[in-house]
Image (cartoon, helix red, strand yellow):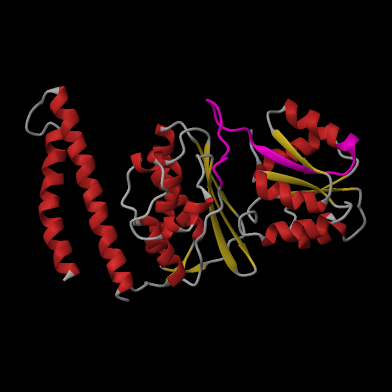
């Protein structure tokens, strides 16, 4: 029934959208500006209806157990870059900074590449739709054989009371600004089901105090984990003078809290720290799916044979020994966060 209904709805809708596009392209001659604007609204609403038809059909197939996955080996990095290419124009239109961070060592994944692309397009599209200023980021990483893709933005955030229901059918966060953005209320429900069919999970971490930025792109945020005030001051002066924003932690335990709250773009991790040393702090950060993609540079006075290997084994992406040249440290930072 659903397949037949889908066909019956798509056929006239195809004609509506097809003729609308031809008219807008002046195939039948020029038209008044006001009529052109009205017809553009017809096109937008027609595409919205087509999306709703597709979503209802997908959800119905899932609930009936008729949606099957076409499993194959694929490159998660290629999927992410394909999504980036598809949505970059939308971010540029809103003057949002948009970037992707794909771990260089991603092994081949196995899953339904088309359906996973559908999920990521929905998530990134939502992030762009609901972010008016600042940045949208997608990051892909792997740890302990599990892949993690995080989509982050500087939008208004989602209240705790709404976070569970946004994954339910025909549900959206309950505020007027959300509803003004449109949407079927089905995309996230479908995305969650598809991820669960792959044996994964989809969740949200947010609050209404989301970070926003001014007119230009956001400054790259660096978390400096250092217990010595003099060393922190050197880093403040260095990073502040080169356009980076610095947040701080004085021990490994604080580093975990600050990293989760601030979502930095890079972490400078001292190894010899009180309460929780840099090795363990790094391991815990890398074990957190929401933080695993953040590059970590170890900064330490340990310079014996095997120390660098120990830092990398804990999850550090790079290694700098004290005393370091600020100029050389900045060059190392820029390998991960180009100016």
Tell me the quarter of the picture where residue 233 sits: top right
Q: Which quadrant: the N terminus?
A: bottom left
Across the whole image, how many numbered discs are drawn on residues? Answer: 0
Task: Tell me, yes or no, if residue 82 can be seen here.
Answer: no
Q: Does residue 319 appear to the left or right of 177 in the view shown?
A: right
Foreground: 31 or 210? Answer: 210
Q: What x and y, as percent, mark residue 118?
A: 38, 57
Q: What x and y, as percent, mark residue 174?
A: 41, 47
Q: Residue at x 32, y 48 (%)?
A: 183
Q: What x and y, as percent, mark residue 240?
A: 74, 28
Q: Which quadrant: the C terminus?
A: top right
The relative height of residue 196 versus residue 293 in the rendered view (above or below) is: below
Q: Does residue 90 appear to the left or right of 279 in the view shown?
A: left
Task: Tell me, yes or no, if residue 324 can be seen here.
Answer: yes
Tell me the quarter of the picture where residue 314 sits: bottom right
Q: Which residues are magenta?
A: 207-231
Q: Residue at x 71, y 56 (%)?
A: 285
Q: Residue at x 54, y 27 (%)?
A: 216
Q: Residue at x 75, y 55 (%)?
A: 316
Q: Which residue extends farthest left?
A: 28
The secondary structure that dominates the magenta segment is: loop
Foreground: 133 or 19? Answer: 133
Q: Which residue extends farthest bottom?
A: 65
Q: What x and y, as percent, mark residue 273?
A: 88, 51
Does the magenta run of residues contain 209?
yes
Foreground: 300 or 158? Answer: 158
Q: Does residue 242 appear to the left or right of 229 in the view shown?
A: left
Does the magenta run of residues contain 162?
no
């Amino acid at each position: 029934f659903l397949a037949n209904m889908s066909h019956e709805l798509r056929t006239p809708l195809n004609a509506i959208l097809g003729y609308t596009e031809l008219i807008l392209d002046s195939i039948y001659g020029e038209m008044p500006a006001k009529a052109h604007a009205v017809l553009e609204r017809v096109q937008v609403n027609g595409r919205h209806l087509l999306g709703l038809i597709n979503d209802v059909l997908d959800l119905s197939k899932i609930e009936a157990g008729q949606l099957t996955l076409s499993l194959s080996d694929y490159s998660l990095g290629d999927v992410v870059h394909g999504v980036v290419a598809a949505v970059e124009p939308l971010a540029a239109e809103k003057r949002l900074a948009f970037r992707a961070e794909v771990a260089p060592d991603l092994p081949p994944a196995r899953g339904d590449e088309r359906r996973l692309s559908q999920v990521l397009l929905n998530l990134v599209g939502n992030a762009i739709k609901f972010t008016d200023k600042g940045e949208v980021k997608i990051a892909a990483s792997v740890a302990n054989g599990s892949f993690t893709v995080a989509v982050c933005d500087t939008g208004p955030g989602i209240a705790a009371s709404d976070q569970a229901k946004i994954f339910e059918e025909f549900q959206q966060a309950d505020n007027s600004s959300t509803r003004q953005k449109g949407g079927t209320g089905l995309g996230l429900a479908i995305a969650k089901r598809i991820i669960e069919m792959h044996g994964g999970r989809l969740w949200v971490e947010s609050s209404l105090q989301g970070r926003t930025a001014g007119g230009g792109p956001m400054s790259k945020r660096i978390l400096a984990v250092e217990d010595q005030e003099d060393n922190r001051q050197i880093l403040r002066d260095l990073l502040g003078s080169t356009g980076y924003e610095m947040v701080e932690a004085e021990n490994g335990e604080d580093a975990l809290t600050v990293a989760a709250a601030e979502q930095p773009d890079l972490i400078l991790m001292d190894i010899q720290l009180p309460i929780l040393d840099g090795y363990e702090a790094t391991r815990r950060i890398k074990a957190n799916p929401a933080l695993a993609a953040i590059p970590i540079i170890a900064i330490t006075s340990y310079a014996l044979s095997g120390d660098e290997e120990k830092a990398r084994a804990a999850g550090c992406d790079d290694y700098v020994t004290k005393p370091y040249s600020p100029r050389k440290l900045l060059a190392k930072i820029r390998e991960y966060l180009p100016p």
